[in-house]
Image (tube, rainbow, N blue to C red):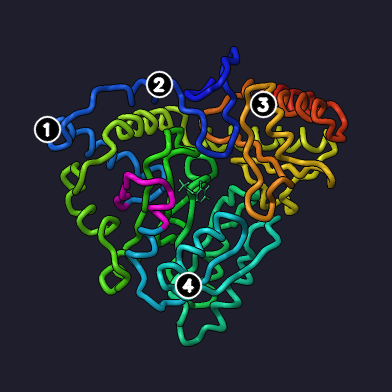
Amino acid sequence: MTYFASKRIAGRHFLQIPGPTNVPDRILRAIDNPVMDHRSLDFGKLGAQVLEKLPAVFKTALPVVIYPASGTGAWEAALVNTLSPGDTVLMTRTGQFAELWHQMAERLQLVCEFVDTDWRRGADAAEIGAILAADKAGRIKAVCVVHNETSTGCVTHVDQVRRAIDAAGHGALLLVDAISSLGSIDYRHDEWGVDVTVAGSQKGMMLPPGLSFNAISAKALKAYQTAKLPRAYFDWQQMLGINKTGYFPYTPAINLLYGLDTGLDMMAEEGLDNIFARHDRHAEACRRASRAWGLELNCAEPRDYSSALTAIRVPEGHSANALRALIAERFNMSLGTGLGRLTDIVFRIGHLGDLGDLQVIGTLGGVEMGLRAAGIPHKPGGAQAAIDFLSGNA
Ligand SMILES: *Cc1c(COP(=O)(O)O)cnc(C)c1O
């Protein structure tokens, strides 16, 4: 199973958490190439190739910056490159990741205002629009939303947020966390007028953790010119400058870039639309399974259902963590834990990244066996409902 497994369990581990996700063997083999000189001619070719292919995934025509950092680093980059101390930002509190981004903003001495939810739906674009319309003085400098809230299994509709900002005639920047949606759920940086998109390598992009991204609009680059938050390592300018030649200002995560190069090829081979349709189908299969079990989806708003993961609530008086622990021990599968206020209330099935129908069925079979073994009240037949759906629509 894992590197630190205390006992051997035969068969492949099912890593069904919503990131990090299963890394395809083809990408692992690419990563397993010798480290090269990052100032060599060959590296310049690799760097240029990756930087040229990457923007298509964000649906942007402008360059995308790559950091050797987890997604959290790219969150910080988005804020420090565009804002100044004391600036007001409108944050949505849709779940644990939105909460953590807001905590970072406060540590950076930004003043936060909030749009709250019950963590069972996406943020309401109309509410964002109303707050902006009331901000006649233009105090709010940025709106920060999490596209796919990985802790709740709910999406916020970024296109609607864009329209709400425009309808309010407000000049705020739009900063979007697409860490767990990029490469899984349709995302359009340019068309939706996003100013900074924050993304990471270990979710829909099928890579190990360790890389993160900023897609940057022309308006965000303009804001960069006057932004006064201290920035050093994450400064866009030196990165964008040297990236033009295919190189990086400091040692890049060379082997992860081999993996990214291969992953981008794989995504192009499958086609983004096919990738999104695959995620939609797998999400629908998981929701059908959940309904057949008689378990409640955490996402209470069907139009906000996530195609990247499904968060399922266990009946009151039962422990989602005990279920997860049992499934890990008995069936060699990792499911996502409940985070923040959803701790022990939900378990999350990650179905993003490199996943086929049989892996989804295996995952749901494991959940169903776990529900039975853990004594969680449910009706049998969830995995069967998914089989019916996936075979009928295959
Ligand atoms: C995973 C995740 C993060 C955190 O990224 P790290 O790579 O762990 O730093 C932030 N936001 C969302 C929506 C995520 O899914």
The Cα–Cα distance between marks 1 and 2, rounded to whole angstroms, is 25 Å
- Chain part drawn in magenta: 62-75
229 to the left or right of 293? left
Q: Find disc 1 in the rendering and name its residue.
A: 41
The image's mark for residue 363 is 3
According to the picture, the residue beneath numbered tag 4 turns out to be: 89
Residue 7 lies within the magenta run = no
Q: Nearer the viewer, mark 3 or mark 2?
A: 3
Q: Find numbered disc 4 in the image and state the secondary structure of the residue it sits on.
A: strand
Q: Residue 48 is drawn in which quadrant?
A: top left
- Closest to the camera, between mark 3 and mark 1, is 3
Q: Amino acid at mark 2?
A: Arg
Q: Is residue 235 above or below residue 353?
A: below
Cβ atoms under marks 2 and 4 closer than 8 Å: no
Residue holding disc 2:
26
Taking 179 as reference, is 114 above or below it?
below
Q: Position of residue 158 (x, y in %)?
A: 54, 58
Q: Position of residue 31 (x, y in %)?
A: 33, 26
Label located before the other in sequence (1 or 2): 2
Mark 1, other Cα within 10 Å: few <14 / some 14–19 / many ≥20? few
In the displayed structure, does residue 360 sit left or right of residue 46?
Answer: right
